[in-house]
Amino acid sequence: MSTIFSNITDILQMNTLVLGDLEERTRCWGPTQCIGDVLLKLSPFFRIYTAYVSNFDRASATLEECEKQPAFAAFLRQRLESEECKGQTLRSFLILPVQRVPRYRLLVEDLVKNTPESHPDHKQLVECLDKISEVAADINEAIRKHENRLKVLAIQQRINTLICNVNVCSHTPTESQKVP
């Protein structure tokens, strides 16, 4: 469960805060109302997506292994037909947090583009866009580092396999290779 769902509970809590703050703000909406401060205040917390995104390939592989179990596959098929899932697979739900930070960035980009510079929210939206873009770049860097570590581990495993496959014991040293 923890491998597949990673830190989804933390992500849910953070998004629940964002939703609550935005709902409160929109209750008394007006032409000079601001939301940039809400997003700006929460933008550092978007970093919690890093762990989820970095774990996504491992989660997918684990899910693939679990799906080979008949009982688990039957459970997933049953859930797929449920009203709550609306025909969406578990995989389609698991990818959503991976897409969330880029979607937030696009949303804030649109807000900046469509908010006049004279509006009281414009400056905070621009600052928020910078923060979210920074988080997105950090997440991408974490993914890149994770992928590089996996490549190094794969190379190391191949080297170890090659070394193990060489039968060193059967090699008889020549006279010049013998230790005196």
Image (tube, rainbow, N blue to C red):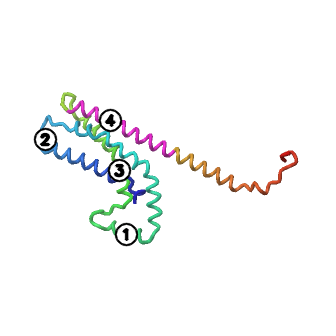
Estimate the spatial distance between the alpha carbons at disc 3 and disc 4, rounded to whole Å: 18 Å
Secondary structure of the residue carrying tag 4 is helix
Residue 87 in picture, x, y percent from top left: 32, 63
Amino acid type at mark 1: Phe
The vertical placement of 42 against 77, above or below, is above
**According to the image, label 3 marks what residue?**
97
Q: Given contact means CB atoms under 8 Å apart, are the residues at marks 4 and 2 in contact?
A: no
Q: Does the magenta stretch include residue 135?
A: yes
Q: Given contact means CB atoms under 8 Å apart, are the residues at marks 3 and 4 in contact?
A: no
Residue 26 in picture, x, y percent from top left: 16, 44
Q: Could you classify mark 1 by the number of other residues whose Cα lies within 10 Å: few (under 14), some (14-19), or many (20 or more)?
A: few
Residue 161 in picture, x, y percent from top left: 65, 54
Q: Taking 128 as reference, is 6 left or right?
A: right
Q: Which residue lies furthest to the right in this view?
A: 175
Q: Residue at x 64, y 52 (%)?
A: 160
Instruction: Kindly report the secondary structure that dominates the magenta region of the rendered protein.
Output: helix
Residue 32 in picture, x, y percent from top left: 14, 34
Q: Taking 156 as reference, is 130 left or right?
A: left
Extent of the magenta region? 121-147
Please give the label number shown on residue 29.
Answer: 2
**According to the image, label 1 marks what residue?**
75
Please give the label number shown on residue 104.
Answer: none
Amino acid type at mark 4: Lys
Estimate the spatial distance between the alpha carbons at disc 2 and disc 3, rounded to whole Å: 28 Å
**According to the image, label 4 marks what residue?**
131
- Say whether disc 3 or disc 1 marks the residue closer to the N-terminus: 1
Estimate the spatial distance between the alpha carbons at disc 4 and disc 1, rounded to whole Å: 41 Å
Amino acid type at mark 2: Trp
